[in-house]
Image (cartoon, rainbow, N blue to C red):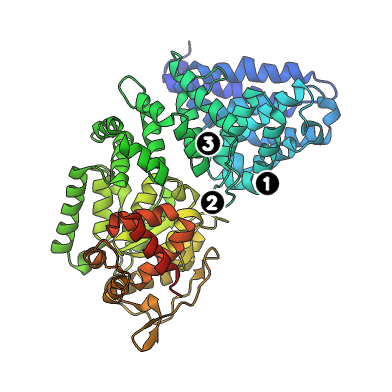
Amino acid sequence: MSSKAADMTDDEVLYKKGKAKIKKIVSKLKALDFNEVDQKTLIDEVDFDILRPMLLESSKMQDITMELLMDYQFLTVLQKIFERQQKDSKYWSGNAHLLTRLLRSVLYWGSESLGKMFLDVEFPKILVDNLSEEHLMNLTSKETVDQVFELVCCCYLAMKLNPNSRLEFRNRDLVKLCTHFMQKAGNDRKLTNELLFVLSYVADLDADPKALKATNKNLFYIHDRLKLTLKNDDHRSEIGFSAAEIFACISRLALSSDNAMFLIGHGIINTCEVVISDGFKDDEIQIALEFLWTLSFQQCGAREIKKNKYLCGLINSHKNSDNRHISDAATGILFQLNVDEELSQKLAGFKTQKSDGQQDEARHIMISYSWNQSEIARALAERLRLEDGCRNVWLDIEKMEGNILERMAEGVEGASVVVCCYSESYKNSQACRSEAEYAFKLNKHIIYINTQADYEANGWIGVLMGNNQHYEMTDSVKLNKILPDLTDRIKQLSTGYQPNQVVEMQTLPYCESTSVTASESEQEISYVSWNCEHVVNWIRMMSLKTDIEGKTREEGVNGNTLAELQHWQIGSPDFFLRFCESSLGMHDPMDILVFSRELRQLK
């Protein structure tokens, strides 16, 4: 052995070995001749003899393989072959699925950077174009079913690696294609299962309410798959999905209230009860708790969880877990259900401490964001800290101590302004929803910033925004553009500072401005201009059974609050009902009906 080889570290030896193999893979694929080479032999060699053994060798070798695949532009090479295959399809009769299988192997073991590259080289277009091929649409043979399965698997794995690819797939009508294949798949449970996984990732319930509406038969099937998978020693299904993956799919399907009600009736809460008891893996306990957290935002789900005292006890036992994700999910459920006296007292303690001991000028600017937008949030925080009057920025990535409630209380309670950096992942996050709704409940000044290109706010975040305006900040260029107006706006809201020029922002297309008026005494004024006493007088005229004047004053309900409540009545009735019950103390159904009717009549 040469002295040079002897001096190499183990990592360097692995890297050298991996580099030689990846070079071999790429050169073979580049030299692929459709007329002369037996494609099956070549693809099988690349897939089974070289790539998979590397990925299965060790976790370190997996990391090295992914790094080398990026360095050698593997996806770009594969993309060119896909494009040629589409043009020269006659040379790939019977073997077309081999390329997709090779791509699936790479995506299965893929990294976050590989997921980003997948989107950069426009692979979503390639996969959807392949799925749209006329000879696949009717699933007339086993070969066509296998090919559709491989393509759908790639779509699922790509969205799992890079959630930002969901919008690209959605814009290319993947939802429509999957719905079509669901109808054609019949009793092919393997393909149906995969299509459900893809639909749960790609569909946006708020943009297309019917997209996630699965048939009862399919929901029954996937729940049974979960229960059977949990009984297997390795907690994997017969086609390779882990129990956590199946649970995550069910959780996304349950965003549809129709699906949620069927799953509750079919015993999904009992399955959660089993999973969060002792003996299951942390990732399974986490996803089961996160599923219950999602359900707790829906009236039917919250009611079923709340009445199961044993389940509430199990959830409570996990709130002090050493696993932060488990602790956060358990605490989030208890906070949402308002069933934990200890948490309520702790939160009240934070409110008293902040209101008594912190002047407005000492309060911070809180940035609320989802983890997918953490880089944008960091960049925003760094730039704001360079601006006078905006230096005191609170970012939870820098405040990791304590559970979610303590971090949320510290962030929201101590804020003069909350900057909400929203996106689709923000809307789909239980933690972000709890945080934003809590800031709104406390009447905090909220500035909304869209951080995802081509995304229009809808669902609960759209309802929360109401008529408010928002900024666009999807990259550093747009950050530079909005920063002067944004800092002026923050200073104006937090300290009363008046900028030299009018702040111009883009109006959100989700909610158009409306002109509303109401009368008081002999003079007509806009009810949006009402202060808290105006609202109290309006409530007195309803003659409700429950005295909610104290709560109305305590919560500081004003005309703006009533305007937002009108949006919630239509766009988020569950949230409207929760506000009436928890914030205003209305528990009598007739009181809520009267209040709701009178609110609708404010014009």
| Distance in Å between CA atoms under marks 1 and 2 | 18 Å
Q: Residues within 10 Å of mark 2 (few under 14, many from 20)?
A: some
Q: Tag 2 or tag 1, which sits nearer the N-term?
A: 1
Q: Where does residue 509 sit, x and y in percent of width and height?
A: 55, 65
Instruction: Between label 2 and label 3, give the one nearer the viewer.
Output: 2
| Distance in Å between CA atoms under marks 1 and 3 | 19 Å
578 in relation to 554, above or below: above
220 in relation to 228, above or below: below
Instruction: Between label 1 and label 3, give the one nearer the viewer.
Output: 1
The image quarter in which residue 264 lies: top left
| Distance in Å between CA atoms under marks 2 and 3 | 23 Å
* Residue 12 shows in this picture: no
Residue at the (57%, 33%) spot, across then down: 216
Left or right, 177 with reference to 488:
right
Under mark 2, the amino acid is Asp
**Picture disc at residue 161:** 3
Q: Where does residue 292 sit, x and y in percent of width and height?
A: 38, 37
- Dots 2 and 3: beta carbons under 8 Å? no
**Picture disc at residue 151:** none
Q: Residues within 10 Å of mark 3 (few under 14, many from 20)?
A: many
Q: Where does residue 168 sit, x and y in percent of width and height?
A: 62, 47
Residue at the (45%, 18%) spot, across then down: 235
Under mark 3, the amino acid is Leu
Left or right, 133 with reference to 349:
right
Q: Tag 3 or tag 1, which sits nearer the N-term?
A: 3
- Judging by the rendered image, the residue that carries numbered circle 1 is 172
- Judging by the rendered image, the residue that carries numbered circle 2 is 206
